[in-house]
Amino acid sequence: MSHVRVYNNFLRDNDVLTITDAETIHKVKDVLRLGAEKSLYLFDGNGKEFLCRIIDIKHDSIVAQKIKIAREEPANIPSLILGFPLVKEEKVDFILQKATELGVSEFVPFTCTRSIQSLPSESKVKRWQKILIEATRQSERLWIPKLNAIGEFTELIRRPYETKLAATITGENARDMFAASSKEIFIIVGPEGDFSHPEYAHLKENNFKTINLSPHILRVETAAAFAVGLVNYFLLHTRNP
């Protein structure tokens, strides 16, 4: 059987764990059909993953014992923060999933002149969090990205991130914009229809460098995934020439 990996956020305190999340129980018990004495990996979303042995499994709980730390790693440096405008639900799902796979440390959704203005419901935010967990599990990451509260554009761009980039159709080549010592990179993508002229002025006033992604017009979700991938590519080659 392939590597069985599930999320549990109460790993550090005890050697014996009780899992009560219904979706995890269903997956382990009914989909994977694991039982007592079988092994599985539990990651805590904060840098650790444990090899565990199932002690008991019931319809409403799984009891497992930690055997050893299988993997442990510090948080990514530089921290890559992605700001994206509120768009239709399926597009947000895509952004969260793909950018998590690509290594984003934090997400900062925001409203601006041409974005969706209505704020998501509590249930939708919980769904977004589940998408982050599942994308982290699937991609073998150990750290679940942080999903920040929804901000407003003019407030967001004033935050003192170390390196601030805005992906635009008129921007510059990204190759020389990342210092090898950068510990924090914030990249923001615009809404459908692009940032307004006043918003471009605000970006300039707040020390954003603009980078070009394509000579063509990209959808928000495409720009978000490509921008993160591009930054990762240049960071990799800056640090490992």
Image (cartoon, helix red, strand yellow):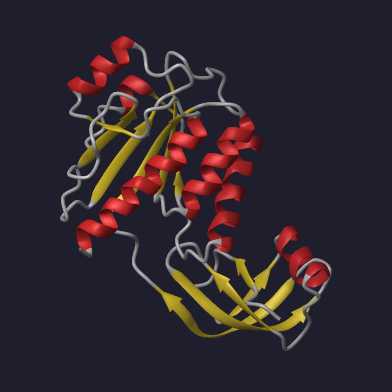
* Residue at screen point 55% across, 50% down: 132
Q: Taking 150 as reference, is 25 above or below it?
A: below
Give coordinates of residue 29: x percent, y percent.
80, 71
Q: Is 104 positioned to the left or the right of 131 in the image?
A: left
* Residue in front for this viewpoint, 147 or 89: 89
Please name the residue shown 58% across and 62% down the image.
138
Image quadrant in which the C terminus is located: bottom left
Q: Describe residue 198's horizontal placement relative to residue 18 as left or right.
A: left
For the question of whether residue 61 can be seen, the reply is yes
Q: Residue at coordinates 46% horizontally, 65% vertically from top-left?
A: 142
Q: Is residue 148 visible?
A: no
Looking at the rendering, in which quadrant would you find the N terminus? bottom right
Q: Position of residue 48 (x, y in %)?
A: 45, 71
Asked where in the image residue 2 lies, by quadrant, the reply is bottom right
Q: Nearer the viewer, residue 104 or 120?
A: 104
* Residue 18 against residue 102 in the figure, above or below: below
- In the depicted structure, whether residue 159 falls above or below residue 41: above
Reply above or below: 99 against 45.
above
Q: Which residue is painted at 26% across and 54% down in the image?
A: 235
Q: Quadrant of residue 76?
A: bottom left
Q: Please count the marks in the image.
A: 0
Nearer to the camera, 211 or 67: 211
